[in-house]
Image: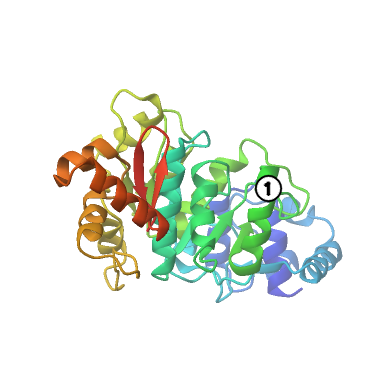
Amino acid sequence: MDERTALLALSRLKGIRNNEKKRIVETYERVAALFEGKASAPDGVSKEAIRAFRGFKTIEAAAAGLTGMGIEIVTIKDDGYPVPLREIPDPPMVLYKKGPLPLTGQCFAIVGARKATHEGMLLAGRIAETLASAGITVVSGLARGIDGAAHKGAVHQSGGTIGVLGCGLDICYPAENWSLFEDMTKEGAIITEYTLGESPLGHHFPERNRIIAGLSKGVLVVEASAKSGSLITARLALDYGREVMAIPGRVFDEAYKGANSLIKQGARLVEDIGDIVSCCFPGIQFRPKPAIDIKGDEDYIYTLMGIDKIHVDELIEKSGLGAKKVMAILTKLEMKDVVRPIPGGYYIRKV
């Protein structure tokens, strides 16, 4: 029995937690020896449990079938397995991957509410787009809302993004993200620890979140209510020694209570994309302004806008340029595709 098949078998053994499986991998030079009966089962794993595992040939056939579908199997012992993920207490033994993007790049997670605001999704997309343009891989959970917006922003910069599923690779959940799913498999990557046919069950998503946190140098929460699942990712990131960051929101708005609470508890407050880069990726050269010709009053207004949305009246007041001139400048910046209007008289920078 080869080691690859043994690790696939180990990943599918029921009744053994992932931290115990990691101990098995660290204890035995060849996990295959356990299944061959050439080594004693470690404490907590009965010989009967190992013998009861059926279908080595079925596993081998399934592995061959996955390869034929363009799905790569990355085991915890492979060079292509991300080192940061291997180091968490309960890493997956096997990752199923679709898409050409390596998993060994510098990663940063962007997570948040499924029922996100329009400006929250714009902000997540813009941050992801800028990080991807600097060569940073954006990681998220391919959910609707903030996750999907982050992936889309990164895809716009040639696919530097990884989506982590809570189901098998033959299921796109939610179904509305099918087009994004397809785009990411062409230039980015979709990964999961679940085999084909496994449904997106509720308990899969906290398990999925540990992979998001484990892959990444830091986690940014863009929007989150007090009960948001993205707070699980943030807590796991803290446990793993990763940077936890959040964007503040309106104090009395339920949609921001989770993110604001993280900041209150010590998460790094993000005011600018440069905060992320300087903290997690200090060696990366980062240009906070777009590679497009804006100067003079256009550059002045663009700089005043900052990272968050800003109302046109506030821009007029801060700039002292007058309403007519500010509106004309905003129109020019919009035509250059570096700012975008959002409902309510607000504007937000796109890059």
What secondary structure is found at the residue carrying circle 1?
loop
* Quarter occupied by residue 256: top left
Front in this rendered view, residue 50 or 201: 201
Which residue appears farthest toward the front when viewing the image?
324
Give how far across and how far down residue 76 sits, in percent.
Answer: 58, 67
Q: Quadrant of the C terminus?
A: bottom left
Protein image colouring: rainbow
Residue 76 visible, this orientation:
yes
Residue 98's image quarter? bottom right
The residue sitting at 40% across, 44% down in the picture is 341
Quarter of the image with the N terminus in it? bottom right
Q: Is disc 1 surrounded by few (<14), some (14 to 19) or many (20+) residues within 10 Å?
A: many
Mark 1: which amino acid?
Cys
The residue located at (21%, 58%) in the rendering is 297
Q: Which residue is drawn at 45% across and 28% down?
A: 227
Q: Is residue 129 left or right of residue 141?
A: left
- In this figure, what is the number of numbered marks? 1
The quarter of the displayed image where residue 80 is located:
bottom right
216 horizontally vs 20: left or right: left
| Percent position of residue 272, x then y | 27, 53
| Residue 132 higher or lower than 124, as above or below | below
x, y (%) of residue 30?
63, 73
Residue 240 in view in this figure: no
Residue at point 16% right, 43% down? 318
Considering depth in this image, is 8 or 288 the residue closer to the camera? 288
Question: Of all residues shown, which one is farthest toward the left?
Answer: 320
Which of 194 and 314 lies nearest the eye of the viewer? 314
Task: Identify residue for label 1.
Answer: 167
